[in-house]
Amino acid sequence: MRAAPATVAVHAWPQQRALAVRALGSGSGLAVIGIATPVPHDRQLARQLVRDALRQLLGQFLDQPAAALALVSQPGQAVALNFPGSQLRLSVSHMPGLSVAAVSNWFAVGVDVMAVDGLASDMPDWAQVALDYLGPVQAALLHRTVPAGRPAAFARAWTRHEAGLKCCRRALTEWTPALANLLASCQEMALSLPDGCCGTVAIGWPVAGQTVNSPTN
């Protein structure tokens, strides 16, 4: 289920807090929030801001004090909620000025965002990067894309790839047919983001043993 035409809303945090909680408790069980962060990028501050927002969102959904919710992570692994009985899945991505977090109540999830502006000058070796990591088919498609549209096309392809890897709990690695088959099990949806930004959220198979999908409001 690799491709999907849907576009997923990114709820501005904290302004659209109620919408995010409602989305998490909906039939899709998926909420994506966007948190404004400083420019130039301060990764440590961005991580703290997105974790604070996640605790508040999860606290309202689970009817628990935000301060009582522990978010844990290990190097190379996605941030996770340590709360008894919960199998909510989380994924986070950062770019200068914006951090996004995806929360899924039903499925494995991955999210990725990228700034398109300046991408062409930042990646003069895009063709080799695309071939090595996105595979020969996607590299050929990018090669046929007009130069003016190539940065946005590369960003769309790259965020799809990264979101799929996160959904499947895989680190960034070079393309192989086996990896392509694995990523094909993900459903990828574009994020609704401002001009100059590109993002994708990917969902996988239902979380094993998941039975809880009860919103608190």
Image: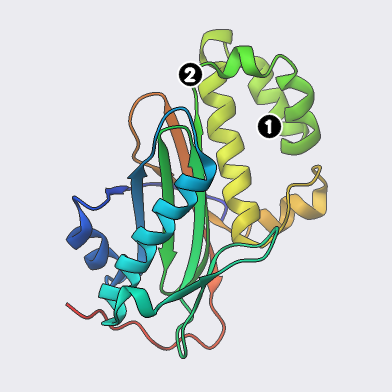
Is residue 9 visible in this depiction of the protein? Answer: no
Label 2 packing within 10 angstroms: few (<14), some (14-19), many (20+)? few
Earlier-in-chain disc, 2 versus 1: 2
Q: Which residue is mark 1?
A: 138
Near mark 1 (Cα within 10 A), the count class, few <14, some 14-19 or many ≥20, is some
Q: Position of residue 67 (x, y in %)?
A: 35, 74
Coloring scheme of the render? rainbow
Q: Position of residue 202 (x, y in %)?
A: 51, 55
**Residue bearing the label numbered 2:** 117
Residue at coordinates 61% horizontally, 56% vertically from top-left?
Answer: 166
Quick check: 99 above or below 68? above
x and y, in percent, of residue 88 in the image: 45, 75
Decide if residue 2 is on the left or right side of residue 138. left
The amino acid type found where label 1 is placed reads Gln
Q: Quadrant of residue 138?
A: top right
Q: Quadrant of the C terminus?
A: bottom left
Tell me the quadrant of the picture where the N terminus can be found: bottom right
Q: Secondary structure at mark 1?
A: helix
At 55% across and 30% down in the image, what residue appears?
155
Numbered tag placed on residue 121 in the rendering: none
Q: Is residue 18 above or below residue 72?
A: above
**Type of amino acid under label 2:** Asp
Query: Horizontally, is 91 left or right of 52 in the view?
Result: right
Which of the 4 image quadrants contains residue 147?
top right
Q: Is residue 217 left or right of residue 166?
A: left
Cα–Cα span, label 2 and label 1: 21 Å
Q: The residue tagged with tag 2: helix, strand or loop?
A: loop
